[in-house]
Image: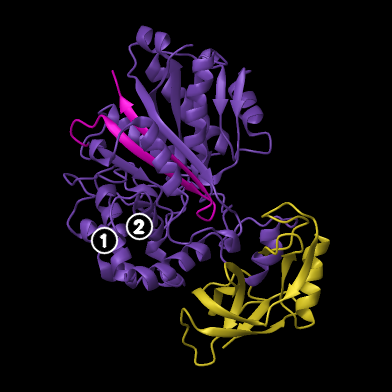
Chain colours: A yellow, B purple
């Protein structure tokens, strides 16, 4: 779990990472202690450019935790590297979501919510 | 090696009389054994889960049995297809002779289900995904549906046809939650309120109590008792992911691989199948599964719904109980899919009986399109 906390700490500093395998160059997310592709344990964080593309979206109308999430809000699968997706909140400035739209990392809240926006 | 078969099955929908998980299961099991001419003491194999941490042990103690064979893998909605397949293998190998696969849940009356899902603090799902405000499993199915709208050119009115078909079947099943409800319209579904867009309340399965049991014995016992024999002609299973971010393909799911394996080993194709029982946690689950197993392209499948091909008298009578959408959904619906298939093949059903049904294809989905099990069943006597 240390790797996961490290990943969030980096995001809180403004950097969205994926893991790079130093032996086979495979990239993966979420962080693990070995490479999915070649089982090497020589992995390091490598930063994305902070952008991503909306792969799909859903607008949640019933918050599971109203203290943190005020419905309605958008949750997206955002592709941050080829074939690597993360689940995050996305603020669409015009309120209209769109698959394929380019979005940019904004912040991680104190509750650990990852925000992107267009 | 012994030969084994699935014999009979019973379902319980205790909507008006809430009771405990143990009571739902024991009622189903005792009813089943009475019908078969067996006693609880004859049972030497048990598969169940979701009862408690020691599910098979706790249920066995309640029943007063000490089985030689048990199975309790946790695979969500596909668990019970896996259990029935393993129970047949266990009887064939002699690990047990008379196995029960049973399930019960009182999730509605006990209010044990929450929209946010079951959260385990040590998991990657909690760390990276539940922390983002997802409704689980609903939001993943919603993300798949929205992607499907984009790639397949379908819409919410199309998905509504799946809920309508389920309601039509439920009105032929007096045990169904929606037996006496009004016929559904597309507008009813679209006006039922978005929960996680594009899925509305009526795109989602019910939350009900319920359960049931299936009997698996070796053929000598079945013949002695005069029980019907249903064979598993083919079985396939694949489990692909549990985190939303790790799903290998968001539209064509693990159902493709599991169904191909089940059909290959059965040496059958869908033209040989008399009824389909396919997990319907959400309308999109059905469309994605039917597309993944190769029934047709998604848009054609929707047209087939409109044309009644999945209703009584159609080419593929589907979810003839009314399914999780309109009959009952006590959490892990997989066993209820098998029970409906067994009862169809045994010819036990009145208004919804598929004429001369002798083969069924059953598909279970669990988690967030995570676990997939397919089986081909055939009644041989």
Task: Inspect this view and state whether residue A52 appears.
Answer: yes
Local SS, label 2: helix
Can residue B336 be seen here? The reply is: no
Give the residue at mark 1: B302
Residue A73 on image: x %, y %: 55, 79
> What's the mark number on residue A113?
none
Which residue is more in the foreground, B63 or A72?
A72
**Quarter holding residue B304:** bottom left
Can you identify the residue that label 2 sits on? B287
Whether B154 is drawn above or below B236: the answer is below
In this view, the residue in front, B229 or B233, is B233
| A79 left or right, relative to B287 | right
Q: Which residues are magenta?
A: B354-381
Residue A55 position within the rendered picture, expressed as x and y whole percent measured from the top left:
50, 73
The residue marked by circle 1 belongs to what chain?
Answer: B
**Residues at badges 1 and 2 in contact (C-beta under 8 Å)?**
yes
Give a yes or no on whether discs 1 and 2 share a subunit: yes
For the stretch drawn in magenta, what is the main secondary structure? strand
Q: At 26% across and 48% down in the image, what residue appears? A: B169
* Number of other residues with Cα within 10 Å of mark 1, as a class: few under 14, some 14 to 19, many 20 or more: many
């Amino acid at each position: 779990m240390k790797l996961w906390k490290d990943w969030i700490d980096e995001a809180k500093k403004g950097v969205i990472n994926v893991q790079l395998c130093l032996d086979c160059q495979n990239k993966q997310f979420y962080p693990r202690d070995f490479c999915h592709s070649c089982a090497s344990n020589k992995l390091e964080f490598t930063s994305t450019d902070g952008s991503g593309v909306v792969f799909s979206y859903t607008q949640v109308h019933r918050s599971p935790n109203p203290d943190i999430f005020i419905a309605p809000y958008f949750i997206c699968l955002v592709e941050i590297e080829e074939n690597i997706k993360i689940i995050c909140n996305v603020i669409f400035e015009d309120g209209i979501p769109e698959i394929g739209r380019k979005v940019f990392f904004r912040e991680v809240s104190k509750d650990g919510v990852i925000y992107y926006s267009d | 090696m012994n030969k084994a078969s699935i014999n009979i099955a019973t379902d319980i929908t205790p909507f008006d009389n809430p009771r405990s998980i143990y009571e739902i299961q024991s009622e189903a099991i005792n009813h089943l054994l009475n019908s078969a001419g067996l006693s609880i003491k004859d049972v030497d194999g048990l598969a169940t889960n979701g009862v408690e941490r020691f599910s098979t042990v706790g249920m066995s103690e309640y029943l007063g049995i000490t089985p030689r064979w048990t199975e309790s893998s946790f695979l969500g909605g596909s668990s019970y297809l896996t259990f029935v397949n393993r129970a047949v293998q266990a009887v064939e190998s002699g690990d047990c002779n008379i196995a029960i696969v049973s399930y019960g849940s009182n999730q509605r009356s006990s209010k044990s289900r929450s929209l946010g899902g079951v959260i385990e603090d040590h998991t990657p799902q909690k760390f990276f995904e539940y922390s983002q405000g997802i409704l689980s499993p609903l939001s993943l199915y919603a993300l798949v549906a929205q992607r499907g709208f984009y790639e397949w050119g379908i819409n919410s009115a199309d998905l509504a046809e799946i809920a309508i078909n389920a309601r039509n079947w439920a009105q032929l099943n007096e045990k169904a939650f929606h037996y006496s409800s009004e016929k559904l319209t597309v507008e009813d579904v679209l006006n039922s309120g978005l929960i996680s867009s594009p899925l509305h309340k009526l795109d989602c399965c019910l939350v009900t109590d319920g359960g049931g049991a299936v009997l698996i014995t070796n053929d000598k016992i079945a013949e002695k008792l005069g029980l019907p024999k249903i064979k598993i002609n083919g079985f396939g299973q694949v489990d692909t992911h549990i985190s939303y971010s790790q799903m290998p393909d968001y539209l064509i799911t693990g159902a493709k691989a599991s169904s191909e394996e089940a059909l290959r080993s059965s040496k059958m194709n869908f033209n040989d199948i008399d009824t389909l029982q396919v997990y319907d946690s959400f309308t999109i689950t059905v469309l994605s599964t039917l597309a993944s197993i190769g029934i047709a392209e998604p848009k054609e499948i929707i047209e087939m719904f409109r044309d009644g091909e999945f209703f009584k008298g159609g080419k593929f009578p589907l979810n003839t109980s009314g399914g999780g959408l309109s009959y009952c959904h006590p959490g892990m619906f997989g066993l209820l899919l098998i029970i409906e298939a067994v009862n169809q093949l045994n010819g036990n059903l009145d208004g919804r009986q598929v004429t001369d049904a002798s083969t069924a294809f059953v598909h279970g989905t669990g988690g967030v399109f995570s676990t997939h099990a397919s089986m081909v069943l055939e009644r041989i006597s």
